[in-house]
Image (cartoon, grey):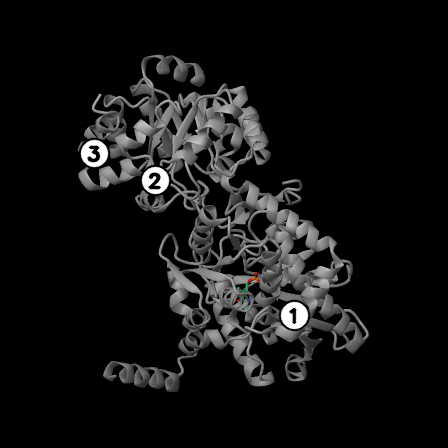
Amino acid sequence: MQDRGYYDQFGGAFIPEILVPTFDELEQAYLEAKADPAFWQEYKALMSSYSGRPTPLTRADNLSSHFGGAQIYVKREDLNHTGAHKANNVMGQGLLTRRMGKTRVIAETGAGQHGVATATMAAKFGFDCTIYMGEVDVERQRPNVFWMERMGAEVIPVCDGSRILKDAINEAFRDWVTNMDNTHYVLGTACGPYPFPEMVSWFQSIIGTEAREQVLRETGKLPRRAYACVGGGSNAMGLFSGFFDDPEVELVGVEAGGRGKGIGEHASRLAYNDASVGVAQGYKTYFLQDDDGQMQETHSVSAGLDYVGVSPILSSLHESGRVRFEAATDQEVIDAMSLTVQREGLIPALESSHAFAQAFKEVGDLDPDDVIIINQSGRADKDIFTVADALKDPKWEEFIIAKAKEYQNA
Amino acid sequence: MLESYIRSRREQKELLLMTHIVLGYPNFDDSLRMVEAMVEAGVDLMELQIPFSEPMADGPVILKANSDALAAGARVEKSLQIAEKITASFDIPFLFMTYYNILFRNGVDAFVARMADIGIRGSIIPDLPPEEGGDYLAAMARHDLAPIHIFTPNSTDERMKLLSDKSSGFIYTVARKGVTGKDTAFSDDLGDYLERCRNATSLPLALGFGVKSNEDFEFIRAKADIAVVGSETIRVVERGGVAAVKPFIRGLQGGA
Ligand SMILES: Cc1ncc(COP(=O)(O)O)c(C=O)c1O
């Protein structure tokens, strides 16, 4: 591997020796694709015909007047096929998998959005597909498990460790070190060993490129601020990269504040002071770990943000100050989601609702001439059980009880 | 030096045996008793694994041992103290096996100095390729400790030469793809691969991953210098307790 992918002190490729040739092959395929304009054309055409891109930039008038500050625009990644930005990365890696002549894909998933996107891509390209998903997430994102299995993917619940996203990543690596000859690991976020952080960010840059053009066309100006939620960091890297050369645009990454500060209560690596630099899952970044370097439990209402590490590229942008990091708590997130559903008829995923929650805290302080963009990374259909629980919806509860009775009597 | 120990031991014994335990699994007292049983049964060198929460290269048996040890409260400092006690009590070389974050969090220089101080002779860090290991390799060299790298069936000849240049003591060759603890087919292909390993390095070769019976030993004899038994000893202890270790190790070596 020529370039080991460092962004200041973060990144690298801390991989087991058995995968060295596999990463060499992947790096080469990635660099060749990047240097080949025909590849990006093919990718854009696929995203247009299969995933409905470009996704719109929607003006949220009701929310804007509710807060009385800047005009709020929402980048609609929820309108991608499969309902989230994850499709951008997955279809790109699908094209690379085909270029490398591999016939099977594996992936980890937290919220299940990346798993569904990967299963969809595998169905379309004719690949075999195995998805690793923490047992806790299988439980809280059941609708996505259902669709993955319908599409022919094998979903393997991971019962080790904290039984969430990081454990699913470990298990996917264990599969890969055995089956690398015919298998590509479609990592779902801008984390992991080089070239993943950079490659995933490259595919997601389609978000920011579109958003910049759209906001200039619609409003004639650049946004004052751009907000995105940060799990591993792929939708944030995607939106932010459109504005890296515009220093006047403030970039705000919003992490999972969970139940507030303190190890085990949240999944904020950068906004809170509970994380430190470490090396795990093949890369160096800020991790929520103890003094010994053991990874700690995390918590978030949203499975997709419930992760111990963060993109090494975002860690370096945090240190340089180019991106500001904030956290939104579970309660703020449920409230922001409810407000957005009621006022705009938009249904942001719990993950995306973190970006909305932070924007809502700040937007009233801005001028009505200002514009902000919120990335709606996905839609919340998958979250119906979690949200219904959080809102204690009595009719939903009645429905589930009746449905369960129906199955019991069948 | 580790290499000269292996060479002189090889003059008396055709195939040496290295075993692997996870420190603190099931508890630190049992770790100590397992080492004692293994040394008495004639083990020639041992890997002591410091538990880590994300053991990416390990299969189900060692993974579970890592997480059970951590759940029982295994701290790194305690592993270091037990290791010191072990090296002081038994007269064979002991190596650390762990993941890079354990060194990194501690400070690589400080950790390596401590290794030297407590009588550990070398280490295997499966998620630290030499390209990322500059600080580690320099510290190991300063303290005359052996950094041991891994050859795999996927390694090119050129890669093997690079890994060999960055290693001392011996080379750990994995018998197959995959993680620890799954079965290995001891076949002609494996023989060819070991010959390729021999040609790439002048260091002694240890063969690990899936070694668990006297038959496997017969196959490895003359093709490698050291047989490594990892997950299987953990399984033996899980089934029969620490008392089962000695008969198992003796059986592997043909009852010797
Ligand atoms: C809708 C949605 N948004 C955001 C994320 C977080 O991932 P990332 O930070 O890589 O964008 C996920 C992950 O599952 C997701 O499903």
In front of the other: A374 or B10: B10
Q: Which mark is residue A47?
A: 1
Q: Which residue is mark 3?
A: B242
Q: In the rendered structure, which amino acid carries the disc numbered 1?
A: Met
First-in-chain label (3 vs 2): 2
**Considering the image in quadrants, where does the C terminus of chain B appear?**
top left
Give me the chain letter of mark 3.
B
Res A119 seen here: yes
Q: Are marks 1 and 2 on the same chain?
A: no
- In the rendered image, which quarter is residue A164 located in? bottom left
Give me the chain letter of mark 2.
B
Relative image position of residue B150 (x, y in whole percent): 48, 32
Q: Nearer the viewer, mark 1 or mark 2?
A: 1
Ligand 1's image quarter is bottom right
Alpha carbon separation for disc pair 3 and 2: 19 Å
Q: Which mark is residue B120?
A: none
Q: Are marks 3 and 2 on the same chain?
A: yes
Q: Residues within 10 Å of mark 2 (few under 14, many from 20)?
A: many
**Considering the image in quadrants, where does the N terminus of chain B appear?**
top left
Q: Which residue is mark 2?
A: B74
Relative image position of residue A238 (x, y in whole percent): 66, 62
Disc 3 element: helix
Q: In the rendered structure, which amino acid carries the disc numbered 2?
A: Ala
Q: Left or right: A92 with respect to B114?
A: right
Q: Are marks 1 and 3 on the same chain?
A: no
Q: Residues within 10 Å of mark 1 (few under 14, many from 20)?
A: many
Q: In the rendered structure, which amino acid carries the disc numbered 3?
A: Val
